[in-house]
Image (cartoon, helix red, strand yellow):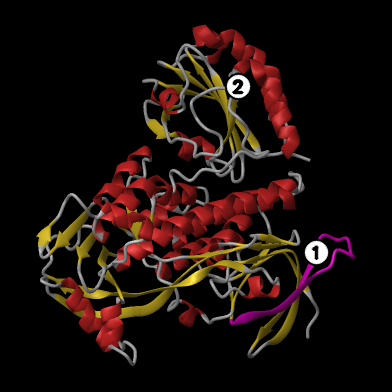
Amino acid sequence: MSAAISTDVLVVGAGPVGSLIGLGLARQGHDTIIIEKRLRDVQTTFGRATTLYPRSLELLEQVDLAETFLQAGFIARTALNFRNGRRVNERGWQSMFEPFRDSFHDCCVNIRQKNSEELILKKYRGDSGKDVWYGWKLETFQIDEGLQDGYNVSATLSHVEKGNLEVRCKYIIGADGGSSTVRHLANIQMEGSNTVFQWIRMDGKMKTSMPDANIGFAAVETAQHGNVLWVKLDEDAHRIGFAVTPPLLAKYPNGITEQDAIKEAGEAMKPFTLQIERLDWWTQYRIRQTVATTLQHDKYVLLAGDAAHTHSSGFAQGMNTGIHDSMNLVWKLSGVLKGWYKPDVLTTYNSERHAAAKQLISIDMEAASLITGNIPEKYQPLGLDADTLLMKVQNENMRFTSGLGVKYTKNFLNKDSQATVLDSGSRAPDALIRGPGVNVLFRLPEKFLHAQPSGWSVLVFAGDYRSSRYQVNAMREHTDRLQKRPGVLRVATILSGPSVDSWTAFGGPPLGKLYFDADGSAHARYGVSLTSSAVVVIRPDSIIAFATTLDQGGRIEAYFDTIFQ
């Protein structure tokens, strides 16, 4: 074995989650090693996430990837629903787009996982100057704080041709899928169970007589194949997915072959025709609905993505949830590595994302059952069919599913708000504002919130300056001190109405940068009256930390004192 090498973070697994974590950390200046036990050409055949929701696109903006995905994927804003060859518009996936209106990313992006991975890895290579270590397998690791040099994890890696290697790191992250080696070696248990439900998914070049087959999404309600999924993917591909129901299991007692799957895909689409001209990939899988007992073990071991939670693909939550995990983790881990944050900040990754995963599983238990055609016991007294109940479950949970409604409970990061109508722990609203002298609107997150990786934002909604002049000036001494923190906190003042220079408004410079909310819509989105004012503190992952009035500047400083070293 050669001499040990060291790195800040060892990421195990080079799927979208592991690659995104590596990218996020690299953009913060941290050294990372990403290993993947499979070779690259094998890795591309595993895992087939396809759809990104609005909140995922917002989060990808933080690592400068949203535009890349929008350019590469298929943009979907419409869904169809059929039963017996006829449109049934009162059901189907179309209603999922309603909550999307809260975001300027009011669409889905359909892109196959192998292409998503390559987009992230290309960015990772460019930002870090490194590549994934393909063919390297994690054999074992141990934690030892005895050397007191910060490198508390020693991991042994193996490669078929290159032998063994020891890597010393400060943290190890398991992003290595549902059969996670990191989770197994850490002896972290999974809570939940395997279901009896089995599904088939197929990607390829397909032709169908179904109307508007390229519109985005479609559902075909069937008696033998469950609620059939149809998706327009990137490039020339489509996806079809259907349930392996008891009649199908009885029909194929020796198992379903590729040709059987192709035949049943055609049956599932009837009365429409289906021709598969090129089959790129297919899978039959049994749904597992499990959550790791913890996402952080012995301080230095972290889990994310499928290593932390498994579920069906029914509501397309796999990669989306993994993106939430990644962006919640990166800023906290980066701040701890840099010595900015107290260690307790990192523990909130476990508490926040574990709760979100459990909520996801509770939804998926109902969704997977209904997509398969089985009605859960709690819904049987309603006397409704599975397709109608599926839409009920979808509509009741779509804000969470889209990511826009994901909300974290109160903790020392998410404090009770004393101003605005926003609840701490929820997503910071998107809004349009204008800069001085520029007659062009821009999005607040794009221009300011995401301008600095892992930076906190303090937004001073000052409304009409004639009403807030004295409060703004009283706040000045506090924001001046806040901005002295090293590269992690930025302040902006947002005035309602037309442009006015800061000296006219306040008799001095603005608090941080100055922006204008000409029509008052930004104030409205944040729940601030134009005749009053408020300060909103936003976490680096664009989650509301808390809000207060302008005369409570000391409370803001005290808040950051609980977080920073």
Residue 254, percent across and down? Answer: 33, 92
Tell me which segment is drawn in magenta: 135-155
Residue 74, percent across and down? Answer: 30, 59
Q: Which mark is residue 276?
A: none
Residue 35, percent across and down? Answer: 61, 74
Per the image, label 1 sits on a secondary structure element best described as loop
Residue at far bottom of view: 254
Q: Earlier in the sequence, mark 2 or mark 1?
A: 1
Is 538 magenta? The answer is no
Left/right placement of residue 278 relative to residue 185 reads: left
The residue positioned 50% from the left and 7% from the top of the image is: 466
Give the quarter of the figure containing the C terminus: top right
Q: Quadrant of residue 241?
A: bottom left
The residue positioned 41% from the left and 51% from the top of the image is: 401
Residue at far front of view: 381
Q: Nearer the viewer, residue 384 or 561?
A: 384
The residue positioned 82% from the left and 60% from the top of the image is: 150
Specify few, some or many for label 2: CA neighbours under 10 Å numbering under 14, 14-19, or 20 or more: many
Is 147 magenta? The answer is yes
Which residue, given by chain and number where applicable, does mark 2 sit on?
511
Query: Label 2 amino acid?
Result: Leu
Q: Nearer the viewer, residue 469 or 318?
A: 318
Which residue, given by chain and number where applicable, does mark 1 sit on?
151
Residue 194, percent across and down? Answer: 48, 73
